[in-house]
Amino acid sequence: MLTLYRNPKCPDADEVEEILRDMVLAYRVELVEPGSWPGRRAEDPSPALREGDRLIVGREAILRHLSALESWVADWRRFQSDACYLDDDGEVC
């Protein structure tokens, strides 16, 4: 499961959390005040995302990771049923 570590007042973390909500993925949020980030410098207020053993730090790195994850999730959802689907161009499977 994904875990978003975020400062309650961080606009970058707001953006990341909105993307996670839109992707409809299971995730949890841990509100972390500056000075108590897991394994990070106390002064760094940027968000962090944990996926398994991997910790992704900072807005840009998280957005790159979520972009790749979004593509993988789209393929996973597309091929996980026996139903036909329409692709982005309106073609039937």
Image (spheres, rainbow, N blue to C red):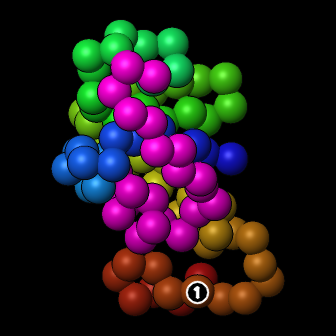
Residue 68 sits above or below residue 75 on the image: above
Q: Is residue 62 visible?
A: no
For label 1, the crowd category at 10 Å Cα-Cα, with few meaning under 14, some 14 to 19 and many 20 or more, is few
Side of 52 relative to 69 (left or right): right
At horizontal 26% and vertical 16% (from top left) the residue drawn is 43
Side of 79 relative to 29 (left or right): right
Residue type at numbered disc 1:
Tyr
Q: Secondary structure at mark 1?
A: loop
Residue 24 sits above or below residue 44 on the image: below
At horizontal 79% and vertical 83% (from top left) the residue drawn is 82
Q: Is residue 21 magenta?
A: yes
Q: Is residue 27 magenta?
A: yes
Side of 34 relative to 49 (left or right): left
Which residues make up the magenta segment?
A: 16-36
Give residue 89's quadrant in the image.
bottom left
Residue 59 sits above or below residue 87 on the image: above
Q: Is residue 83 visible?
A: yes
Please give the residue where the numbered disc 1 appears in the rendered image: 85
The quadrant of the picture occupied by the C terminus is bottom right
Q: Position of residue 25 (x, y in %)?
A: 58, 62
Q: Position of residue 5 (x, y in %)?
A: 47, 38
At horizontal 59% and vertical 55% (from top left) the residue drawn is 27
